[in-house]
Image: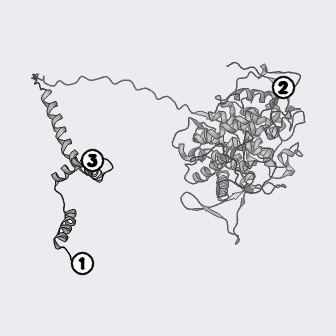
Amino acid sequence: METIDEEEMKEQLAEEMAKYEEEGYFKRLLKMFSGLGRPHASREYKEAVLELQRQIAPLLAILLPVIGAAILFVVTAMGGSSEKKVTVELAQVEEDKPLEDVEKPPETEQPPDMDVEVQMDAPSISPVEQAEVAPPTAEPQSVKVATVDAMLNIKSPVTMKSVAGTARNAGVRGRYTGGGAQYGDPKTEAAVMKALRWLKLHQNRDGSWPGIRPASTGLAILTYLAHGETPSSPEFGKTVERGLENLINCIAVKDGKTVMNGSDGNEYAFLIGTYALCEAYGMTKNPNARAAAEKTLSRIIKGQSPTGGWDYKINPKSKRDDMSFAGWALQAIKAGKMAGIHLDGMDECIKKAIKCLQTRNFKNGGFNYVAGGNPTGLTATGCLAMQLLGYSNTKEVKEALDFMRDWKPSFDPKDLPKGKSEAAAGNCPQYYCYYATQCKYQAGMAKNAASGNQALWKKWNAEMKALYPNTIIADKNKDGSPVTIKDAKGKPQEVGHWVNKDAHTTRPVMDTCLAALQLMVYYRYLPTTQLKATEVEKDVEDLSKDKSGEIKVTIDI
C-alpha cells in the first residue's frame, strides 16, 4: 500500500486554495505591470492585458473629473472679471396731458370681388358598348393619386359661375330653380337630385360607373361638378372623390402614348375623361387632377389633324375631321383653359379648330358629321364649339341656330332632327339635345340677345321642363316600393334615372348624365358673350390654306 505524504498533500491543497483567493487591488496592479513585460505568447502577458482592460473604466472615472476640474480652474483664473458702474438717472415725468383728437382716415371702399366667370359645357359618348367594369391592368400608371381631397381647403382662383355671376352653390341653385320662363323650377331640381342619388347608388366599388369606364365615370363626375359637388360635399363628397381617383388611376402610358385603360376603340372616352379632369381641377385645384389633365390634354392638342379637326383614335395624320369627335376635344380644351391649364400650342390649336369649323365642317347652313358632308344633327355640336370659344356672333352660329329652330327635347329617336341616320350619335336623341340645350341657352340668355333667340330658348326650356321631370324612371324594389338612399341628414330619398328609347338600353349612366346636365344649365356657367377671360384673339382670318388643305398658322408671342 502506497504511503501518503501528508506534508506534500497540504502543500498541494494550499496551492489550489491560493488560486481561489481574491488578490488585492495593488497586488493585481503589480502583477499586471509585471505581466506586460513578459513575452506576448505567455500566459502572464495575456492575463496582464485582461487586467488592463478591467482597470481602464475606473481609471477614467477618476481621471476625467480631475482633468475637467483642472481645466475649469485654469480658465477661471485666467479670465479676470471687471466691474462696470452704471449710472441711472431718473427723469422727472411730466403730468399727463389729454390727447388731441386725431382725425380718422377716410374709409376706403372694398374692391369688388374679381371672380373669373367660367362657362363649362357638358358631355356625350360614342355608341360603342362595353362590359360593366374593365379588369384592372398591369400596365404601369403614368399618374398616381394620393387623395383627391388633398387640396380641397384651398380656394380656387377660378370660380365656376352661374348665369348671374355667382358661384355654384345651394343658394344660387335655389335662386335659379325657383321658376320663370328662362330658368328651372323645383321639379327640375328635384329630378336632378334623384339622378345624383341614383348615380351614387350605382357607383361601382372601384369608384367607376357601369359602361365604358372613362366615359361613364367622366360623365358622372361632370354631372356632380355641375351641381357644385366636390370631394368636400356632405352628401356626395366621397362619391366624387372615389370617381375622380378611379379616373386618374386609369391613365397609363402604352407604346409611348398616354391612354385611358378601359376606353372605347375610337377613344371617345379619352376625350370625355379629359374634360372631366380639367373641370375637376378648375373646381378643386387638386394637383393630382392637374397632373392627369395636363398629360391627357397634351395628347389631344398634339393629336389635332393638319386641317384643324380631330378623328378617331386622336389620329394627327387624318383629315377626316369628325364633328362628333371634335366636339368633345374642344370641350376638354375649353375646360382646361378655364381651369388655368395653359399648354404649349393650346391657342394655336383653338385657332386652327375654328378655321376648320368654318371652312370644312360647315355647309348649307349647318355643321356636318365629317368634313364635306351635309348638315346633320351635329349642327348643335359645331354651334356650341363656336360659342364656347368666343365666336357667338359669326354667321355660322347664326345659321346653325336657325337650322335648329324646330328641334324639340326628346328621348325618342322618332323625334331626331335632320341627319337622323347619322351613326356617330347612335340614334341617341339626348346626344343632340345635350348640345342643343346649351346652344339655345347661350343664344337666348346672352347679353342683348336678339328677341328671336330669347323666344326660342324660352320655348325649348318650357318643353324641357315639362318633359324631363315627368319621364325620370324611379327605381323600384321587388315589392313595388321605391328604392331610396339616405341623404346627408340620414333621411331616405328616392332615386331615378333616364333612358333613351333606342337600341342602346345598356347605357343608363350616359342617358341620365346628359339629361341631368341639361337641367343644370341654368346655374352651370355664364353665357359666353359675358365671358372674356378665354376668348381667343380674333385673328383666325390670318390663317391661310394651302393646296394640301393644311392650315398654316402664324402666332405672335
Q: Nearer the viewer, residue 145 or 428?
A: 145
Residue at mark 3 to residue at mark 1: CA–CA distance: 41 Å
Which comes sooner in the sequence, label 1 or label 2?
Answer: 1
Q: Badge 2, how many Cα within 10 Å: few under 14, some, many 20+?
A: some
Which comes sooner in the sequence, label 3 or label 1?
Answer: 1
Badge 2 is on which residue?
Answer: 550
For label 2, the SS is loop
Badge 3 is on which residue?
Answer: 38
**Residue 28 appears at what percent x and percent y?**
19, 53
User: Going by the image, does 396 lie left or right of 231?
Assistant: right
For image coordinates 61% across by 52% down, the residue present is: 242
Q: Badge 1, how many Cα within 10 Å: few under 14, some, many 20+?
A: few
Q: Which mark is residue 217?
A: none
- The reply to whether dot 3 and dot 2 touch (C-beta < 8 Å) is no
For marks 3 and 1, give the one nearer the viewer. 1
**Is residue 409 visible to us here?**
no
Q: Is residue 378 magenta?
A: yes
For marks 3 and 2, give the one nearer the viewer. 3
Q: Is residue 72 magenta?
A: no
**Residue 270 appears at what percent x and percent y?**
73, 43
Q: Quadrant of residue 108?
A: top left
Q: Nearer the viewer, residue 453 or 170?
A: 170
**Residue 309 appears at what percent x and percent y?**
80, 33
Residue at mark 1 to residue at mark 2: CA–CA distance: 128 Å
Please state the extent of the stretch shown in magenta in the rendering: 370-379
Q: Check disc 3 and give the amino acid type.
A: Arg
Q: Check disc 1 and give the amino acid type.
A: Glu
User: Going by the image, does 240 lie left or right of 427?
Assistant: left
Badge 1 is on which residue?
Answer: 2
**Is residue 132 visible to us here?**
yes
Which comes sooner in the sequence, label 3 or label 2?
Answer: 3
Q: Check disc 2 and give the amino acid type.
A: Glu
